[in-house]
Amino acid sequence: MPERTILICRGTGCVSSKSPEIMEELENLLEVHGLAEKVEVKQTGCHGFCQRGPILIIEPDDIFYCEVKVEDVQEIIETHLEKGEVIDRLLYTDPQTGQHVPNYKDIMFYKNQQRVILQNCGHIDPEKIDDYISAGGYVALEKTLAMTPEEVIDVVSKSGLRGRGGAGFPTGKKWQFCRNAEGEPKYVICNADEGDPGAFMDRSILEADPHAVLEGLVIAGYAIGASHGYIYVRAEYPLAIERFAYALETARERGYLGRDIMGQDFSFDIEIKKGAGAFVCGEETALMASIMGKRGMPTPRPPYPAMSGVWGKPTNINNVKTLASIPVILSKGADWFASIGLEGCSGTAVFALTGKVANSGLVEVPMGTPLNKIIFDIGGGVPDGKTFKAAQTGGPSGGCIPAKDGEINVDFESLAAAGSIMGSGGLIVLDEDTCMVDLSHYFLSFTMEESCGKCPPCRIGTKRMHEILGKIKAGRGEPSDLQKLEELAYTIKNGSLCALGGTAPNPVLTTLRYFREEYEEHINNKRCPALVCKDLIWYTINPEKCIGCGICARKCPVGAISGEKKEVHVIDHEKCIKCGICFQSCPPKVKAVEKKTN
């Protein structure tokens, strides 16, 4: 038995930062130092703290090294493994205290979470089925096969699990509808078409713990009476697809998938379907059309998928996080799961915490956790002394929650009441430098481009809203534009065929609700208070601060800055294209280049 194990993250984020090369160097140098028998090197999936990758954890010490480079490996072996000394410079530094934190369990990002869905992520090798089994994997499936399908559905119903794909529909009820539906065969689908900008929860779970999703899908198939399942995952997730495909292969070899699973009279298999990256295919009916080889476009409901889904047969569709919750519920019991979170909204929520926050990455907390706790106790707050302004929840179709409402509970009903949505789990933190008009314009541009074009409210309405927001950003807005925006927004919400159109106006409606004065500043005073909208700002050089270093002049792509060395420089506003490079390149200790608005 090895004395120590080194866990090296090989999720997509860390792989892009050369974690495979780090792992190879570790294995080579351990051989050179004669430690190969004493130290095991194990790859894992995403540990969640993607911002600090590549991540390397040494067990049983639980020492957490972050932002590791290939050239650090020699020192890790000689200093930590051979001398038993912790390397301070590779430790996480708490942004609030400035102190090094050796044990990852003491890092604020981790210690304030409660990991249920992500419990195995970063701790097991996703390509070794025995790792999953050692962590309690497939115990739930064994228990399931000793129960009747109705008993399984009853456990899921009593747990209070609601769909983690965004809608929050009770999972047990959804399964029951499909089981009761007439028609054979029946199908189950895992929706892994994660398309929100900045969202990577489903991808990370598939990369780090594919067997949990697989086991949940098999249990769902048993419960509703299906013998075939699909996982619909976008082709832009090659590592997730590769690891899930390998999980399917090894599960078949071990008898957890295929004919007569675990020696019982139940056969079930899974097929991978790759999506082409259309955001609208996250919608159930568009997803099923894509699986059947048709263009991914929504269709009216009813009939619902449980009655007539893929190939016209009863179909159940669940999100990755929903299915990954199933083995835990069957293993630990409905009461245990229901005790987490809120009554009527049990369990945990997984977020991709990004934006203007000190600690970004995957976060899992009980349903009902206050927004501020996620942003400040886990995320470490807004960096660089900036002020927290708002949080965008639910991705491009979500809404903005202002800082004054930061104590709002993060659950389906509370967010809906505030004009936002839970969505699939995106959470973007915004600071004082964010222009809410510009933000709304950005999100509308995304949903407008991703509209399938089938229904006029979404196809035409989002384009009109986008045009009006563009006018306001450019300083050409009129007071009547705000009423037009609201009228268009509610027409799109009420008239669109699917949830893409139904939620697309949320960013505009919530920013109008909470930040209306910012729109009015753009319209009435031609000002952008956040100094973002190009047509309403200009750059100038403060003569009292300029030291004549010439960096801004050398960086300017259009030669709009002139001045002699060690003398005050000036910007020719006729030439300036407002790219902001001068502002970014001016030395922090000088800050002579300034942004201005009316």
Image (cartoon, rainbow, N blue to C red):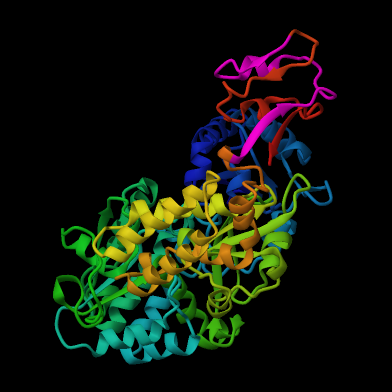
- At a point 25% along the width and 69% down the height, the residue shown is 285
Q: Within the image, what quadrant is residue 216 found in?
A: bottom left
Is residue 298 shown in magenta? no
Q: Is residue 360 visible?
A: no
Is residue 547 shown in magenta? yes
From the viewer's side, name the closer residue of 220 and 285.
285
Place of residue 294 in the rendered image (x, y in percent of width and height, measured from the top left) = 16, 59
Place of residue 113 in the rendered image (x, y in percent of width and height, measured from the top left) = 65, 66
Q: Within the image, what quadrant is residue 558 found in?
A: top right
Place of residue 242 in the rendered image (x, y in percent of width and height, measured from the top left) = 34, 49
From the viewer's side, name the closer residue of 299 and 102.
299
Residue interval drawn in magenta:
536-563
Q: Within the image, what quadrant is residue 268 found in?
A: bottom left
From the viewer's side, name the closer residue of 10 and 344.
344
- At a point 29% along the width and 80% down the height, the residue shown is 222
From the viewer's side, name the closer residue of 132 and 592.
592
Q: Is residue 58 above or below residue 117?
A: above
Q: Is residue 327 visible?
A: yes
Q: Is 478 displayed left or right of 142 in the figure? A: right
Q: How many marks?
A: 0
- At a point 53% along the width and 42% down the height, the residue shown is 14
Q: Is residue 206 above or below residue 309?
A: above
- At a point 62% along the width and 60% down the height, the residue shown is 391
The C terminus appears in which quarter of the rendering? top right
Place of residue 356 in the rendered image (x, y in percent of width and height, measured from the top left) = 65, 50
